[in-house]
Image (cartoon, rainbow, N blue to C red):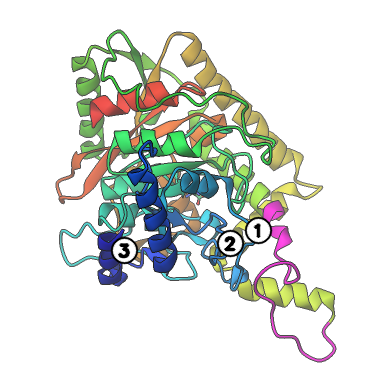
C-alpha cells in the first residue's frame, strides 16, 4: 500500500486517480495486516486497489466524473466495494473515467483526460474509456488491480489499449447496487488487472446475489481461480465471420490469427460461425444506451444530488432544472440525453427504441444458436486500432467515435461475459488485445481460455 501511494503521487501526470484516499488506505492496510497475522485471511486481504469513480464509496466523493455530482459524498457503500473491502482489499482512491461512463477515451471526464502510460513517441495517448483511469493505473503499477464497468466495452477496450486484462461478467453476476447508472440493462461491473489469475480472485470477491439489485442472479459463485487449469482440449472456439469488417487493419487480423493458433495448439477446435445480426449491434446499442441514459439521468435535477446552479431573482423551478443541467452535464452527456429523449418520444418510439429492442433479441438469439451448436467460446478483436492520440477523436464526428465500439457492444446487448487479454505489441510498439466471449454464467470457462492466451 505504501509503495502504491508513493507511485500514485509520482504519477499525477497520468491523471488516473481523481481522488486519493491515503488515510483510509493505511487504516484498511493495518486492519488487513492484523487479519493476515491471525491466519486464514482471504487472498485479496491487504491488496491495494483503485476504484472507478462510478462506484459509490461511503464518505468518499463519488462523482462519476461529472460536474453535476460535484460535492456528492455517498452515505452508503456500493455492494461491489463493500464485498471487496469485506475480503480485505484496500482502496487507494477513485479512478478517472468518462463522464457517466459515456465515451471511449476518458476525455469526457470533468477532471480532464487520463493518459496512457504506454509511450512510444512524443504523442500522449488515451488509455481508452470509459474505465481509462482504471486501465492506466493498473498498467502503470499504481495499484495491483482496479474495478471497472462495461456498458458497451468500457472494461475490454481500455484493457486492450493498455496491455492489461479485464472481464465483463454475465449481466446479473455482479450487483449494480450503488453504481451510478448509465444504461441499466447493459451495465455490468468487473475487475481489471495484470493477470487472468488476479481477475479470477477479484471476480470471486465481487460477484454474487444481492437482494438490493433485482437483476442480480441468485446463483452460486464458482471458484474461478480453481478453474484455471489451462486444459481446453476438445473445446470449440467460434470465429464469427461478421467480425471480419472491411477496413480492419492487417495487424488486427494477424493478431486474431495468432490467437486462433494459440488456442488450436492447446487442443481446442477452431470453428467458423455466423452471427448474422451482429452488424446491427452498433446502431441498436446507440439507441438503447442513450434511451436508458436519458431516463437514468433525469434524477440529476439540482435538488437531490450534487451541483445546483446559481439562480437569478424571479427564477422558478424550471429555470433551476434547466440551468443546473446545462451547467452540470458535459457535451457528450447532453448529446446522449437528447438522443435518448428523442428515440423514446411518442412519435418515434416504435421506429427507434422498439426496433432496437427487436434487433437486440435477434443478436442474443444468434449467440444462443452458436452455443447450442456446441461452441464454448468466441474469439474476436476488441478494437479496430491500438490506442489513439489524446484529442485525436475531437476531430471526428460523434458517429465516427462510436464506430470504435463495433466489436464490444454485442456482448452487452446479449448479456454475455467477455474477457480481454493482451496479445503483444503492434508495429508502433503499442499493446493490442483480443476478447473471448462465453456462455452465460461461464466466467470460469472463459477465464480458463483467457489463461491459455495469456
Ligand atoms: N464507448 C461506449 C459508450 O460510450 C461504451 C461505454 C461503456 O461501456 N461504459 O457508450
Disc 2 or 3, which lies upstream in sequence?
Answer: 3
Secondary structure found at label 3: loop
> How many residues crowd around disc 2 within 10 Å: few (fewer than 14), some, or many (20 or more)?
many
> How many residues crowd around disc 1 within 10 Å: few (fewer than 14), some, or many (20 or more)?
many
Residue picked out by circle 1 = 337
Percent across and percent down for residue 123 are 22, 65
> How many residues crowd around disc 3 within 10 Å: few (fewer than 14), some, or many (20 or more)?
many
Secondary structure found at label 2: helix
Residue picked out by circle 2 = 333
| C-alpha distance separating marks 2 and 3 | 21 Å
**Quadrant, the N terminus:** bottom left
Pointers 1 and 2 in contact (C-beta within 8 Å)? yes
In this view, the residue in front, 436 or 191, is: 191
Q: Which mark is residue 115?
A: 3
Left or right relative to 312: residue 125: left
**Quadrant, the C terminus:** top left
Q: Which residues are magenta?
A: 294-315
Question: Residue at 68% of width from left, 41% of height from top?
Answer: 212
Judged by its main secondary structure, the magenta piece is loop
Percent across and percent down for residue 206 are 49, 39
Percent across and percent down for residue 322 are 74, 73
Q: Which mark is residue 174?
A: none
Question: Residue at 20% of width from left, 50% of height from top?
Answer: 430
Left or right relative to 110: residue 34: left
Disc 1 or 3, which lies upstream in sequence?
Answer: 3
Q: Is the shortest distance between ligand 1 and the CB of mark 1 under 8 Å?
A: no
In this view, the residue in front, 35 or 3, is: 35
Amino acid at each position: 500500500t505504501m509503495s502504491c501511494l508513493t507511485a500514485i503521487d509520482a504519477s499525477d501526470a497520468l491523471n488516473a486517480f481523481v481522488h486519493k484516499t491515503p488515510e483510509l488506505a493505511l487504516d484498511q492496510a493495518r486492519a488487513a495486516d492484523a487479519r493476515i497475522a491471525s491466519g486464514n485471511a482471504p487472498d485479496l486481504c491487504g491488496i491495494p486497489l483503485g476504484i472507478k469513480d462510478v462506484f459509490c464509496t461511503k464518505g468518499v466523493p463519488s462523482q462519476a466524473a461529472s460536474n453535476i455530482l460535484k460535492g456528492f459524498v455517498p452515505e452508503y457503500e456500493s455492494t461491489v466495494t463493500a464485498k471487496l473491502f469485506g475480503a480485505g482489499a484496500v482502496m487507494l482512491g477513485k479512478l478517472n473515467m468518462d463522464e457517466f461512463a459515456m465515451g471511449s477515451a476518458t476525455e469526457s471526464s470533468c477532471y480532464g483526460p487520463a493518459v496512457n502510460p504506454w509511450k512510444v513517441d512524443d504523442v500522449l495517448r488515451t488509455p481508452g474509456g470509459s474505465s481509462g483511469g482504471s486501465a492506466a493505473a493498473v498498467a502503470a503499477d499504481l495499484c495491483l488491480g482496479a474495478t471497472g464497468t462495461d456498458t458497451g466495452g468500457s472494461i475490454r477496450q481500455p484493457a486492450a489499449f493498455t496491455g492489461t486484462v479485464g472481464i465483463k461478467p454475465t449481466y446479473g453476476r455482479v450487483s449494480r447496487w450503488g453504481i451510478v447508472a448509465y444504461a441499466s440493462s447493459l451495465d455490468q461491473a468487473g475487475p481489471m488487472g495484470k493477470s487472468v489469475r488476479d481477475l479470477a480472485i477479484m471476480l470471486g470477491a465481487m460477484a454474487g446475489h444481492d437482494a438490493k439489485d433485482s437483476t442480480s442472479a441468485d446463483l452460486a459463485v464458482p471458484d474461478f481461480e480453481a478453474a484455471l487449469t489451462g486444459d481446453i482440449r476438445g473445446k470449440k472456439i467460434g470465429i464469427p465471420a461478421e467480425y471480419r469488417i472491411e477496413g480492419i487493419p492487417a495487424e488486427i487480423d494477424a493478431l486474431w490469427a495468432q490467437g486462433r493458433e494459440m488456442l488450436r495448439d492447446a487442443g481446442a477446435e477452431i470453428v467458423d460461425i455466423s452471427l448474422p445480426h451482429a452488424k446491427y449491434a452498433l446502431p441498436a446499442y446507440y439507441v438503447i444506451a442513450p434511451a436508458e441514459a436519458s431516463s437514468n439521468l433525469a434524477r440529476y435535477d439540482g435538488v437531490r444530488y450534487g451541483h445546483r446552479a446559481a439562480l437569478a431573482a424571479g427564477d422558478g423551478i424550471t429555470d433551476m432544472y434547466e440551468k443546473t443541467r446545462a451547467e452540470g452535464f458535459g457535451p457528450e452527456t447532453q448529446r446522449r440525453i437528447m438522443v435518448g429523449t428523442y428515440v423514446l418520444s411518442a412519435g418515434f418510439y416504435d421506429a427507434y427504441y422498439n426496433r432496437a429492442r427487436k434487433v437486440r433479441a435477434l443478436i442474443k438469439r444468434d449467440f444462443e444458436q452458436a452455443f447450442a451448436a456446441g461452441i464454448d467460446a468466441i474469439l474476436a478483436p476488441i478494437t479496430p486500432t491500438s490506442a489513439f492520440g489524446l484529442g485525436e477523436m475531437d476531430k471526428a464526428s460523434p458517429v465516427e467515435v462510436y464506430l470504435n465500439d463495433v466489436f464490444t457492444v454485442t456482448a452487452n446487448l446479449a448479456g454475455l461475459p467477455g474477457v480481454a487479454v493482451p496479445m503483444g505489441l503492434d508495429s508502433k510498439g503499442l499493446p493490442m488485445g483480443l476478447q473471448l466471449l462465453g456462455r452465460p454464467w461461464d466466467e470460469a470457462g472463459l477465464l480458463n481460455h483467457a489463461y491459455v492466451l495469456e
